[in-house]
Image (cartoon, coloured by chain):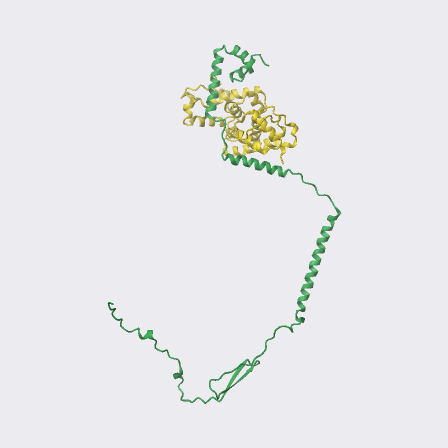
Chain colours: A yellow, B green
């Protein structure tokens, strides 16, 4: 019944030690052991992988589309697609990075179908460079501690609102870099572009965010 | 290994992504520039603010159901993907409609046969069945000298009983005297009586 066992030869890393199935901390080495077992058809091990990574995948998708119910469904789709594609996972990247890549494709397929970018979304083409303060830094300079502002949750709402006004590419690069903590190289793998493109997108995305959140930081 | 301090190296240095010899090289090159150090500090502050403001991991609602639904979907898709053996053609399959037609014809003929038997029910011998035996009624008379004779006619749907020996009823007989009268009952007799005083016993 288990599709991942179709081609076990593609499982590059075999489990080299015991895996604690109750330990849901996402240790990359444990991930690879669990992946190897899941590739042999062990659905229980895959369930552990889902438990380990569902939070990050759900958060990433929710930050991308800002709709919790759809984010839940799309997260489901990510893990189901990942299971079906598990025989092709060659452990050249971290399992989490591979999941982010699948999530990226799922979100872009979804937005393409919904044409979410066409109505009411922020258009990067309209957002001219002149609107950005030329003297501004790439990163906003906070006058107060973010922790203090976060106490009321207002900062989070402001940032999420500002993220929602970015284009999908800019929003994703900020979410992956500044929220999820991926490296440039990992983001390039996830988004299917060069590292230079990632750097460029991140630079402009941060500039736009700084402009939109300017009043928040000048208070 | 990239040891050249270009823009890519600068971006990686600003994001603290360099390690080992690359980091040492970049640190020696950019770390002496106050503007670069300030830019790196701003980048660090920005990342810290974002990571605090927006959580990197959020458990999906109904997380247990989240997992179980994935497991169920995977199992269902696996069962759907089970190979189905194609049915081979056989000349015997051509006999199936013929057998069905023969069955229907047999059922039709059997039905006809059953209905014909119903028409012959009148010819069934019912001699063994119990028959109704006419019995003359027994007549009783209250007086010894009276004789009762009973006549019946099915054609006339009439029954006549002749009492022979009964004295003729005189015309002066008052039939109202034979009518039933209600007898005074005890309960009625007590209706108009004044209740007696209850004695203190």
**Along the line of sight, the residue nearer the viewer: A101 or A133:** A101
**Along the line of sight, the residue nearer the viewer: A46 or B36:** A46
Q: Identify the image quadrant of the N terminus of chain A.
A: top right
Residue at image point 65% right, 32% down: A6
**Along the line of sight, the residue nearer the viewer: A214 or B21:** B21
State left or right for residue A14 relative to residue A178.
right
State left or right for residue B22 relative to residue B98.
left
Residue at image point 54% right, 34% down: B67
Q: Is residue A140 above or below residue A105?
A: above
For the view shown, which residue lies furthest in the front direction? B201
Q: Residue A51 appears at what percent x and percent y?
A: 53, 31
Question: Which of the 4 image quadrants contains residue B107?
Answer: bottom right
Q: Is residue A214 above or below residue A51?
A: above
Q: Residue B82 appears at what percent x and percent y?
A: 65, 38
Q: Residue A71 appears at what percent x and percent y?
A: 52, 32
Q: Is residue A38 visible?
A: yes
For the view shown, which residue lies furthest in the right direction? B91
Q: Residue B169 appears at what percent x and percent y?
A: 44, 88
Figure label count: 0
Q: Identify the image quadrant of the C terminus of chain A.
A: top left
Q: Is residue A117 visible?
A: no
For the view shown, which residue lies furthest in the left direction? B200
Question: Which of the 4 image quadrants contains residue A106?
Answer: top right
Residue at image point 47% right, 16% down: B41
């Amino acid at each position: 019944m288990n599709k991942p066992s179709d081609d076990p030869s593609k499982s590059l890393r075999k489990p080299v030690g015991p895996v604690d199935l109750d330990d849901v901390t996402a240790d990359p080495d444990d991930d690879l052991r669990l992946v190897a077992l899941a590739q042999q058809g062990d659905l229980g091990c895959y369930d552990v992988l889902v438990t380990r990574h569902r939070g990050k995948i759900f958060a990433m998708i929710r930050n991308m589309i800002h709709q919790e119910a759809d984010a839940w469904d799309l997260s489901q789709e990510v893990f189901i697609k990942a299971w079906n594609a598990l025989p092709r996972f060659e452990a050249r990247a971290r399992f989490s990075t591979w999941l982010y890549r699948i999530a990226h494709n799922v979100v872009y397929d979804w937005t393409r179908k919904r044409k979410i970018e066409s109505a009411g979304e922020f258009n990067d083409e309209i957002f001219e460079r002149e609107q950005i303060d030329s003297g501004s830094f790439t990163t906003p300079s906070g006058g107060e501690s973010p922790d203090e502002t976060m106490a009321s949750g207002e900062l989070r709402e402001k940032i999420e609102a500002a993220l929602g006004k970015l284009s999908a590419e800019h929003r994703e690069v900020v979410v992956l870099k500044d929220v999820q903590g991926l490296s440039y190289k990992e983001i390039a793998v996830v988004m299917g572009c060069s590292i230079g493109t990632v750097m460029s997108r991140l630079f402009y995305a941060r500039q736009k965010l700084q402009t939109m959140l300017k009043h928040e930081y000048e208070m | 290994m990239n040891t050249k301090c270009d823009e890519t190296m600068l971006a990686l240095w600003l994001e603290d992504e360099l390690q080992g010899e690359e980091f040492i090289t970049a640190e020696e090159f950019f770390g002496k520039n106050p503007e670069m150090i300030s830019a790196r500090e701003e980048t660090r502050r920005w990342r810290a603010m974002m990571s605090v403001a927006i959580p990197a991991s959020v458990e999906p609602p109904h997380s247990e159901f989240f997992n179980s639904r994935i497991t169920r979907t995977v199992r269902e898709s696996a069962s759907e993907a089970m190979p189905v053996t194609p049915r081979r053609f056989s000349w015997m399959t051509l006999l199936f409609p013929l057998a069905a037609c023969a069955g229907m014809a047999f059922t039709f003929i059997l039905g006809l046969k059953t209905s014909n038997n119903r028409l012959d029910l009148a010819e069934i011998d019912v001699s063994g069945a119990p028959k109704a035996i006419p019995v003359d009624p027994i007549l009783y008379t209250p007086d010894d000298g009276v004789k009762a004779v009973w006549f019946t006619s099915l054609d006339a749907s009439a029954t006549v009983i002749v009492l022979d020996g009964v004295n003729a009823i005189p015309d002066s007989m008052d039939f109202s005297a034979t009518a039933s009268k209600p007898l005074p009952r005890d309960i009625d007799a007590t209706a108009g009586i004044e209740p007696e005083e209850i004695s203190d016993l």
